[in-house]
Image (cartoon, rainbow, N blue to C red):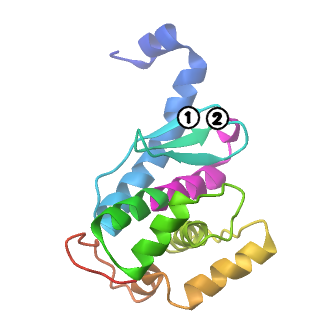
Amino acid sequence: MNNKKEFINAFGIEKWNELEKLKPLQEAVDIVCNEYLGIEPIPVVFESLPEDVARYDFKLQAIILNNKYINDYIELLDGCFHELEHHWQRIYIANYDTPKAKRWKTEYENYDKYNQTQEIEIDACAFSQVILSCEFGIKYKHPNKYIQYMIDDYINSRKILLYLMLMENKLKPLNMKEDIII
């Protein structure tokens, strides 16, 4: 496809609009992958999801966004970073034999989609909130106040190293070859 008109003729205006909405989200994911996590960027796509704003597809290694939220940029951005952290957690588990890697591995092996208090979920929420705040100036809070309290505690207890590094402007991409114990 050489231009917008050809694309729209081939796929329709709705697909064009989805593509336009994905561009800034993919760019944001690429920045976080490259500048913060030190990992290869992963694709972001829209699909029809039954309930979630976003999910991480482990087999495809992609972030799937619910097209019902196509006009809610902040929810989609939060979903991107939350799911990106799940991707990074899997990389961490595969490369480290730390207590955290073992806990996360156990949680993934016994994953309960409806248990938002699992460390892997609190960590993903905390990561997203820190990136949204520090990189985009967006103060995002979880809709469940109890979960938000756990996220705040997780961030404040220094369990999320990224938060401290961002706050001190000392952030550099994580080198997966270094043994960072969090």
- Give the residues drawn in magenta, as a range: 68-85
Query: Would you say 69 lies left or right of 128 here?
Result: right
Q: Is residue 79 magenta?
A: yes
Identity of the residue drawn at 43% across and 46% down: 26
Which residue is nearer to you in this view: 24 or 36?
A: 36
Q: Which residue is mark 2?
A: 67
| Residue 71 occupies quadrant | top right
Identity of the residue drawn at 48% across and 74% down: 103
Which residue is nearer to you in this view: 108 or 79?
A: 108
Q: Secondary structure at mark 2?
A: helix
Q: Which residue is mark 1?
A: 46
Q: Quadrant of the C terminus?
A: bottom left
The mark nearer the N terminus, 1 or 2, is 1
Looking at numbered disc 1 in the image, what kind of residue is underneath it?
Phe
Pinpoint residue 123: horizontal percent, then vertical percent.
Answer: 54, 72
Q: Is residue 77 magenta?
A: yes
Looking at numbered disc 2 in the image, what kind of residue is underneath it?
Asn
